[in-house]
Amino acid sequence: MKEREFWQLLEEVLGRTYGRSLAHDQVLTALDGMTVVEALADGVEPRVVWNVLCDQLQIPDSKRWGKDHNAPPLPAK
């Protein structure tokens, strides 16, 4: 997942205003207390940030990837 795709998905699933607000304000406990914006700026893979945010907000897999999206592959380690 590219960062551009992350932001598109965020807006589709959570709405533009709410999603952008969460990205700046929601502390992600699984990512050492960083916000979405901080985690992405720190180089955390966008798919990881997305999954952590969705897990924390309890967004089910059926809604997490939007209406026409498939889950992107996990990053190579």
Image (spheres, rainbow, N blue to C red):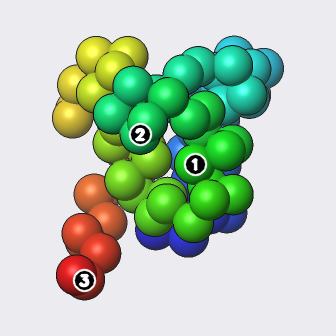
The answer to whether the residue labelled 1 contacts the one labelled 2, judged by CB atoms less than 8 Å apart, is yes
Q: Secondary structure at mark 1?
A: helix
Rendered view: 66 above or below 42: above
Residue 76: which numbered mark, if any?
A: 3
Q: Is residue 58 left or right of residue 2?
A: left
Q: Is residue 19 left or right of residue 30?
A: right
| Nearest to the observer: residue 7 or residue 68 | 7
* Mark 1, residue position: 39
Residue 31: which numbered mark, if any?
A: 2
Q: In the rendered image, which quarter is residue 59 located in?
A: top left
Instruction: State the separation of the CA atoms marked 1 and 2.
Output: 7 Å
Q: Secondary structure at mark 3?
A: loop
- Residue 12 seen anywhere in this rendered image of the structure: no
Q: Earlier in the sequence, mark 1 or mark 2?
A: 2
Q: Residues within 10 Å of mark 1 (few under 14, many from 20)?
A: some
- Residue 3 seen anywhere in this rendered image of the structure: yes
Residue at 29% in and 75% down? 75
Q: Is residue 34 left or right of residue 15?
A: left
Q: In the rendered image, which quarter is residue 19 located in?
A: top right
Q: Quadrant of the C terminus?
A: bottom left
Q: Earlier in the sequence, mark 2 or mark 3?
A: 2
* Residue, far front: 32
Amino acid type, residue under disc 3 in the picture: Ala
Instruction: State the separation of the CA atoms marked 3 and 1.
Output: 18 Å
Could you say where residue 15 lies in the image, as x and y percent from the top left? 66, 23
